[in-house]
Image: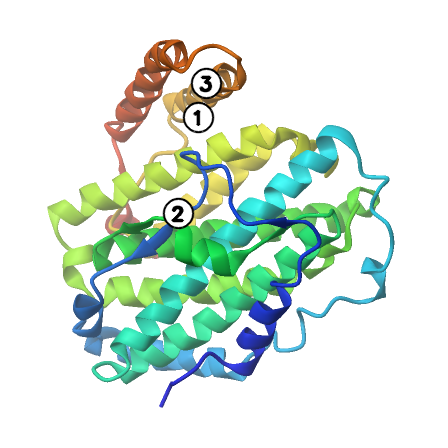
Amino acid sequence: MIDAPPKAAVAALKNIQKPAIQKPTIQETLLVPRFYTTDFDAAANLDLSAQEAELRTMLAEMQADYNRYHFVRDESFQQSWEHITGEARQAFVDYLERSCVSEFSGFLLFKELSRRTKDRSPLLSEIFHLMARDEARHAGFLNKAMGDFNRTLDLGYLSKQRTYTFFPVEWVIYTVYLSEKIGYWRYILIHRHLQAHPENQFYPLFKYFEPWCQDENRHGDIFKALLRSQPKLWNTWKSRLWCRFFLLTVFATHTLTVHERADFYTSLGLDATAFDEDVIRRTNETAARAFPSVLDTEHPQFFARLHRCSEQNLAIAQIEASPQPKWLKVLRKLPRQLSILGHLTRIYFLKPIDAEAMRGTIR
């Protein structure tokens, strides 16, 4: 029976309500992580038989709770961080904020999925219960880090006041799989970079990225099993179109977000463009193990058009920050927004890679 969040999750969520300077709301933009809801009856009625053995193996891994004692702040946090100033400080705080909202969004979705599937799909319910535990830990740890910079989010307030976006359960499976896998590659690549360049590790949070990314990887593997348990999500012509759509959506969001936070990556000694491309290439390769069709990231137009989207997005941000009347901002932003849509459409219709045919040849 699953009647309440695990103790570790409850403790994490209690801790994140202890504010430094409480910030109950966040600035809503297209790139800020959303809160989601779905068709819980459809989720409870999923036939998992084709991947039940794999899901039970993943459940055993989740129950082992390898990171039970990982998210504990040590003495390295007990110092002043006032020496991190200016744009680098703001970029890092923005990174923490968006990451915290993203993790908390996952917690809310998984917690509700666990509660609403408990009676009809006990296996799925327990898996979501433990995934919610992990997301709560992540959100709590990030919010404590924000407190070191005199900022915290009132996540309880956000959970009640923010608008929830409805996604069909099929869309949830596609998007969560991709968000967890791209999160894995972001964390592990930053970890590897800082291992090679420890002089750029300006805050102890980064020491936690290697085990942290394993949570992301496990969550992604769970959603891969869910995806492959539903033939309509990978064995139809429509599924090929949807897979490419969600890949493009996640990759475009990643490119725009990374370049918005370029100062953060510079402070780590990373080139934002090179990092973005590496993450996207590796995530696309990983997705080819689950999706029937993936994008051709080596096509000469692929990154060129994504970079044009990023340039237009940065120009839109400048327009938005200007003191001009709202109606004028709308007019000035419109051609740039249409340009982004045009580039993304052209990318979508580039010849894709047949992942089913390549299965077994990708690392």
Label 1, residues with CA under 10 Å away: few <14, some 14-19, many ≥20: some
Q: Which residue is mark 2?
A: 34
Name the front one of labels 2 and 1. Answer: 2
Q: Is residue 280 left or right of residue 201?
A: left
Q: Whole-percent x and y of residue 290?
A: 31, 56
Which residue is rendered at x = 44% and y = 26% of the image?
303
User: Relative to residue 158, is residue 232 drawn left or right?
Assistant: left
Q: Secondary structure at mark 3?
A: helix
Q: Quadrant of residue 330?
A: top left
Q: Locate residue 292 relative to residue 30 in the image: left or right.
A: left
What's the residue type where badge 2 is placed? Arg
Mark yes or no: residue 362 visible: no
Q: SS for tag 2?
A: loop
* Kind of residue at disc 3: Ile
Q: Amino acid at mark 1?
A: Phe
Q: Are marks 3 and 1 in contact (CB under 8 Å)?
A: no
Q: Position of residue 5 (x, y in %)?
A: 46, 78
x then y, percent, for residue 142 = 63, 56
Vertical comparison of 219 with 56: above or below: above
First in residue order: circle 3 vs circle 1: 1
Mark 3 highlights which residue? 316
Q: Residues within 10 Å of mark 3 (few under 14, many from 20)?
A: many
Which residue does the numbered mark 1 point to in the structure image?
303
Residue located farthest toward the bottom when viewing the structure as drawn: 1
Q: Earlier in the sequence, mark 2 or mark 3?
A: 2
Residue 91, x across and y down, in percent: 66, 35
Q: Which mark is residue 35?
A: none
